[in-house]
Structures are given as structure tokens and as C-alpha cells.
Amino acid sequence: MKGSIKIEKMRSDDWEAVRAIYLEGIATGHATFQKEAPSWEEWDLGHNAECRIVARTEDEVVGWAALSPVSSRSVYAGVGEVSVYVSQKHIGRGIGSLLLKSLIEISEQNGFWTLQSSIFPENEGSIKLHINNGFRVMGRRERIGKMDGVWRDTILLERRSRIVGNN
């Protein structure tokens, strides 16, 4: 990997690189129930515009993170679902942690008081990443969805802000 990693706001012209990393995650079978990446327009509509970032070296996007709303109801306006993806060739270099730490900070600047993530139990690295960044395991959601005809569980993790939503 050349140079240092910079965390920057995601731009629409980052989409092809972001999509490629998302497709790598999909291919693992342990990152998401999704079977294909959406179009930029669909993805853009489903994610908070202020809470989407990329990890970039001098010459490439090597990871991304974003928040999506958990509900359209106003009482849940400060609750976001976390997505963190790192290029397979850059895993194990601390990029996921840089992304998640930055996303937490940006989320709080934008009024989020709770972040949650649903992770397949087999994705031990992602569970560890979240726990190491202040998330706690809320429980196991058994047989929450089918993937290729097989019921899958997820582990629900949550992080409550210490600075937003405390009054």
C-alpha cells in the first residue's frame, strides 16, 4: 500500500471503487444478505448524505463506511445502521478501525445517538472491530433471513453515544 490512509467524505465519483469493494464483501457470503450491488442512485437514496466516508491512499479507495436510517419515523432519526467495508487486499491493516472511528465521530456531529450493526456470526473480524470501537452485543437474531435457501442468524450490536442524546 502506497502512502498513508486518508479518511474523506465519499463523493459520487467514488462509487465505482466503493461498489467494487461492496461486491468483494458480497462475494464472501458473510458481509450482507444482498446478492448484488445497487445502482449509485439507489444506494445514494438509502444512505445518510453526511455520514458516508472512504479510506483513500494516494491512488485508490481501499474502504468505505456509511450510515443508513433504521426507520423513517422521526423518533428514530438519531439511530443509524452501520456499514463498513474494506478491500480484501487491504484487510488487517487497521483501515476498518480508522473508518469506524471516523464514522462514529461524524455520526455524533450529525445528531446520531445510537449506531447499530447486524453482523453474521461467521464474520468474526467485523464483530471484533465493532466491539473494539465501543459497540456491545445486544443479542443473536436467529433465523432472521434466508440466503441461498438457508436460514441465517445475525448478531445485533449497538453503540450509544456518550455526547448525543444524553439529556
Image (cartoon, rainbow, N blue to C red):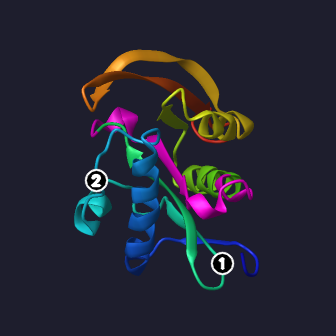
First in sequence: mark 1 vs mark 2: 2
Rate crowding at label 2 as few (under 14), some (14 to 19) or many (20 or more) other CA atoms within 10 Å: few
Q: Is residue 85 magenta?
A: yes
Residue 158 place in picture, x, y as percent = 56, 30
**Amino acid type of the residue that numbered disc 1 sits on in the rendered structure:** Thr
From the viewer's perspective, tell me whether residue 24 is left or right of residue 138.
left
Q: Is residue 105 above or below residue 125?
A: below
Quarter holding residue 69: top left
For numbered disc 1, what is the local secondary structure?
Answer: loop
Quarter holding residue 142: top left
**Amino acid type of the residue that numbered disc 2 sits on in the rendered structure:** Glu
Q: Which residue is mark 2?
A: 36
Q: Which residue is mark 1?
A: 57
* Residue under the image location 36 percent in, 37 percent down: 70
In the image shown, does 135 or 64 lie closer to the viewer?
64
Q: Is residue 18 above or below residue 106?
A: below
Magenta span: 72-96
Mark drawn on residue 69: none
* Residue under the image location 56 percent in, 35 percent down: 123
For numbered disc 2, what is the local secondary structure?
Answer: loop
From the viewer's perspective, tell me whether residue 93 is left or right of residue 70.
right
Residue 50 place in picture, x, y as percent = 46, 63
Residue 165 place in picture, x, y as percent = 57, 36
In the image shown, does 75 or 46 lie closer to the viewer?
46
In the image shown, does 91 or 39 lie closer to the viewer?
91
Query: Which quarter of the figure is the C terminus placed in?
Result: top right
Q: Is residue 136 magenta?
A: no
